[in-house]
Image (spheres, rainbow, N blue to C red):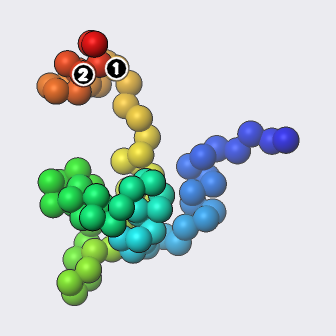
Amino acid sequence: MTDTDPTEELRRLYPPILTTAHVAEMMHCTIGDVRDKVHRGELAAVRWGQQFRFFRDEVIASLIPIGPDQLTGVDAERNET
């Protein structure tokens, strides 16, 4: 069994430009959750008519966890408990 880099696996499985449904699948959440993240500015998207499109590498980058030294505000308070 080989250890594969999860980011490389996502790059292999998904096209370079993603739909909202693709992103929801990648993030294990609902399409509505993805739209909410876009509207809150937590996830970058491009308007495509009345739909959103996402760049795969930007979505992957948003999934990479940050270290404890990079936490600020509410996230830092949650991490202390």
Tell me where residue 39 sits by quadrant.
bottom left
- Read off the residue under disc 1: 68
Q: Residues within 10 Å of mark 1 (few under 14, many from 20)?
A: few
Give the side of residue 54 with respect to residue 14, left or right.
Answer: left
Residue found farthest to the right = 1
Q: Position of residue 16 (x, y in %)?
A: 48, 70
Please give the name of the residue rendered at 17% of the width and 54% of the height, measured from the top-left corner: 41
Q: Position of residue 55 (x, y in %)?
A: 39, 66
Q: Position of residue 31 (x, y in %)?
A: 33, 66
Q: Could you say which is closer to the camera, residue 77 or residue 55?
A: 77
Name the quadrant of the C terminus: top left
Give the side of residue 78 with respect to residue 4, left or right.
Answer: left
- Which secondary structure lies at badge 2? helix
Residue 51 in sight in this render: yes
- Read off the residue under disc 2: 78
In the displayed structure, would residue 55 be above or below residue 72? below
Please give the name of the residue rendered at 27% of the width and 12% of the height, measured from the top-left corner: 80
Q: Could you say which is closer to the camera, residue 25 or residue 60?
A: 25
Which amino acid is tagged 2?
A: Arg
- Which secondary structure lies at badge 1? helix
Residue 44 in sight in this render: no
